[in-house]
Image (cartoon, rainbow, N blue to C red):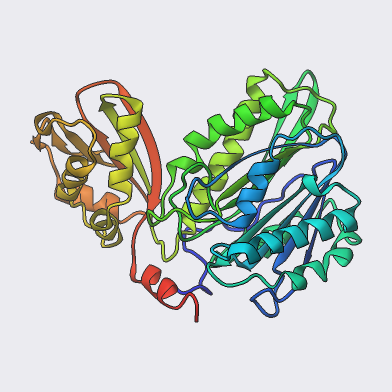
Amino acid sequence: MASITDVSPLAPAAFPDLPVIDGVAFATAAAGVKYQGRTDVMLATLTAGTVVAGAFTRSSTRSASVLDCQAKLGKASSGTAAIVVNSGNSNAFTGKGGVESVEAITAATAQACGTLQERVFTSSTGVIGEPLPHARITAVLDTLSNTTSPAGIADAAKAIMTTDTFPKGASASVEIDGETVSIAGIAKGSGMIAPDMATMLVYIFTDALIGQDALQSLVSKSNAQTFNCITVDSDTSTSDSLIVAATGASGVNVEGQDAFADALHGVMLDLAHQVVRDGEGATKFVEVIVTGAATDAEAKQHAMAIANSPLIKTAVAGEDPNWGRVVMAVGKSGATADRDRLSIRFGDVEVAKDGWRSADYSEDAAAAHMKGTDIVIGVDIGIGSGTATVWTCDLTHGYISINADYRS
């Protein structure tokens, strides 16, 4: 049975070797916010002129940190900037005290790093409803600001983990006009994953030169096709934050460059997939592909109904090709469907066609696909040209064990 200490069987073999991004430096500390004997605070400092874009949860109970970041995003400034993240406590549902904690942390960070308070972005992740002991964070900021390293991104990825079983990182390099532009990102997330604007905590850094509006446009577009297309348990966090920082240190203007847009999208998709692969208790990575819907939006509605269905997720865990549960999910999704045009496949195995079990259906072939670790559920609605792809994982006893003991 899975536990928080077990590494997901879907984890990559090792943390990737991420490139150093000019203009970014990292430091971590063990502040004892909740965890003992492990780092739980990360500081990233950003060179003067860095532009910041992002996306955040639309939860009506979002945290004080999220609200503060949303208020600051897009404000013009050419000065330095900083990002401070703590794990162990989400500073959500903490009322006036939560706002005071954010104010204290951003003020102390601004002083320690020699930047403006409006250029300090914070995130908190962990237990909801507990006052954040922010003095433990402010107490380590001077040390953090004096020990930053451009090569510290791997340690930063570890410091932001909560129930994650492995740190998550991804990168890309792209050549534009003979010059190299680099992108490196880290993420945390394992449970309470059903993004609504962004997801979990994600920080992506690039040395590209780009305006804030242009960067924001790229981030929003790719976010809709990556982080907003994953789900572990259908629960949207109060703290979901995606921050992308472009230092401009390469001197390469990437506005209007499809190669950069594609590279950024690839990093975001890689991180999103890693979050699903670290889904609490997960043993299977599931791709749900819907075609033939009335619109793209309705295709996604069908796909998320499938991906969020406990009946489907437990069938996947049990390696059971129970396509009847897929029929159920399509029917309940609320999007347009015609029972007699519906076709379903597991991997390359067609199990249903035009509203009936396929004449060529092989239970053994379908079951063989379900025994793998990467599962594909394909559904053609048969009424239009709308398409969508989303990603999820199975639902196991491990998920229950982790969340039953989460506050213990």
* Residue 357 vs residue 234, the one in the foreground: 234
Where residue 378 appears, as percent x and y from the top left, is 28, 38
Left or right: 390 with respect to 210? left
Quadrant in the picture for residue 394: bottom left
Image position of 136 (left or right of 201): right
Residue 231 drawn at (x, y percent): 41, 50
For the question of whether residue 169 can be seen, the reply is no
Instruction: State the residue at coordinates (30%, 61%).
Output: 317
Q: Nearer the viewer, residue 251 or 65?
A: 65
Residue 230's place in the image compared with 41, above or below, is above
Residue 401 occupies which quadrant of the picture?
Answer: bottom left
Task: Give coordinates of residue 371: x percent, y percent.
Answer: 30, 56
Q: Toward the viewer: 352 or 342?
A: 342
Is residue 228 visible in the rendered structure shown here?
yes
- Rendered view: 149 above or below 39: above
Q: At 65% from the left edge and 66% from the top edge, which residue is drawn?
A: 97
Q: Is residue 315 left or right of residue 395?
A: left
Q: Position of residue 188 (x, y in %)?
A: 59, 57
